[in-house]
Image: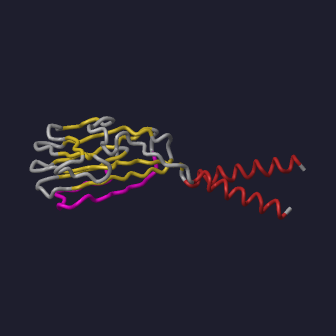
Amino acid sequence: MKKIGSSIAGLALAATAVFAAPAQANLVTNGGFETGDFSGWTQTGESDFNGVQCAGPGASVYAGNCSAYFGPFSSQGGIAQTIDVGSIGKTWTLAFAFMPDGGMPSSFTVSFGGKTLLSITDPVASDYVVYQFSGLTTAENMTLSFDFFDPVGFLSLDEVTVTSVPEPATTALMGAALAGLLLMRRRKAS
């Protein structure tokens, strides 16, 4: 009987590992702005000096061929997208590359699911900086928004990704349930 118990424990561990490592697809539409425009995004606020630039002279691209730039000068402007994260209680990860130009005054704010994740006033000029945030989903659809203000230049954004996987406790529970089913099946076969 000890051998069956250790076999079941091994199967449960293997099942947990299989369920815990699903492929994580980017849930953001056009997160790298590779369409050459804001397809998949809704522009918000002032948008006269917002756009997408693709590789070429003077283009500031982090990954791929294109990136977005924002230069609202009289009030905030930006982009937003509602992300279908699937269900409540999943772990989400948001990552993006941001490049400030050092112009003052300027500001940059990131919100996801109604919660402000990052708010920077007068960021110092630098090359692209990659930011990453994680949390649990609170709804099946969560809105991701980026807001900018830069009357004297442009702030750049690229490579926006959101991934979502079930919480580890959920995958462990699925593995334990599978082990229980295998044990019941094994007993019936005996």
- Above or below, 40 against 133 in this view is above
Q: Position of residue 21 (x, y in %)?
A: 56, 53
- Above or below, 118 against 137 in this view is below
Front-lying residue, 49 or 140 = 49
**Is residue 57 within the magenta segment?**
no
Instruction: State the residue at coordinates (50%, 41%).
Output: 87
Q: Position of residue 135 (x, y in %)?
A: 43, 53
Instruction: State the residue at coordinates (15%, 45%).
Output: 71
Front-lying residue, 163 or 121 = 163
Task: Place residue 105 in its image quadrant.
Answer: bottom left
**Image quadrant in which the N terminus is located:** bottom right
* The residue stretch that appears in magenta: 116-137
**How many numbered marks does the figure carry?**
0
Q: Is residue 47 left or right of residue 113?
A: left
Q: Position of residue 90 (x, y in %)?
A: 50, 48
Instruction: State the residue at coordinates (73%, 60%).
Output: 9
Q: Main secondary structure of the magenta part?
A: strand
